[in-house]
Structure formats: C-alpha cells, structure tokens
Amino acid sequence: MSGVEPHLLSVSFDTFKEDTLCSDAELEIIHQPLVIECQDCKHTETLIDIKYTCSNCGNSNIKVVDGEDMYLMKVEMS
C-alpha cells in the first residue's frame, strides 16, 4: 500500500547492484499485513484477503490504520 511494488523494487535492486562494490548485497522484504478500522462500528481487524469491508458490520467505510508504510530497517556493511 505504500505505492512501492515489492517485486519491482527487488528487480531494481538486483539490477543496480551489478558490477559494483555492492554486488553481494541482499535485499530482504518483510510483508506486513494491513490493519483496518471500521469508521462506523470502530471494529479493528487484520486483513487476510483483500476485502475492504468490515467483517463485523459489513460496511465499507473503513480506514487503513497500519501496514501501508515501507521502512528501511537496517543496512549492514562489512
């Protein structure tokens, strides 16, 4: 949801590291599930399937409250 396609990021990373000092670098992507909150009944849930409706009341008035960000967690150099 961050607007970054993980597969394309991985392919780009592999392409740009070729023939550089970073040729042995690895990219690890950890996917975080989306958490939504219904704006009508305030029910919060983790999405398993891509469905943007509240499983509690069935309304589609939901807000994504977690899981749409992308963070660079660690860079290791040796």
Image: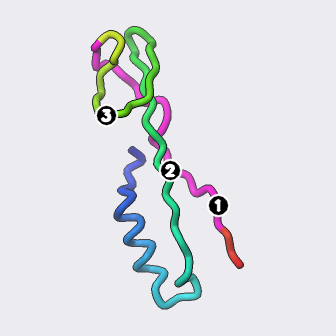
Residue depicted at x 38% and y 10%: 40
| Residue 22: image location, x then y, percent | 57, 82
Label 2 sits on residue = 70
Instruction: From this view, report whether residue 25 is shown above or below residue 27.
Output: below
Instruction: Answer with the quarter of the image where residue 5 lies.
Output: bottom left
The residues bearing labels 3 and 1 have C-alpha atoms spaced at a distance of 29 Å
User: Magenta segment: does it hold 2?
Assistant: no
Label 3 vs label 1, nearer the camera: 3
Which sits earlier in the primary sequence, circle 3 or circle 1? 3
User: What residue type is disc 2 on?
Assistant: Met
The residues bearing labels 2 and 3 have C-alpha atoms spaced at a distance of 20 Å
Magenta stretch, residue numbers = 58-75
User: What residue type is disc 3 on?
Assistant: Asp
| Residue 77: image location, x then y, percent | 68, 75
Mark 2 residue crowding within 10 angstroms, few (<14) / some (14–19) / many (20+): some
Instruction: From this view, report whether residue 7 is shown above or below residue 39.
Output: below
The residues bearing labels 1 and 2 have C-alpha atoms spaced at a distance of 12 Å
Q: Secondary structure at mark 3?
A: loop
Q: Secondary structure at mark 1?
A: loop
Instruction: Answer with the quarter of the image where residue 25 lies.
Output: bottom right
Label 1 sits on residue = 74
Mark 1 residue crowding within 10 angstroms, few (<14) / some (14–19) / many (20+): few
Residue 49: which numbered mark, if any? Answer: 3
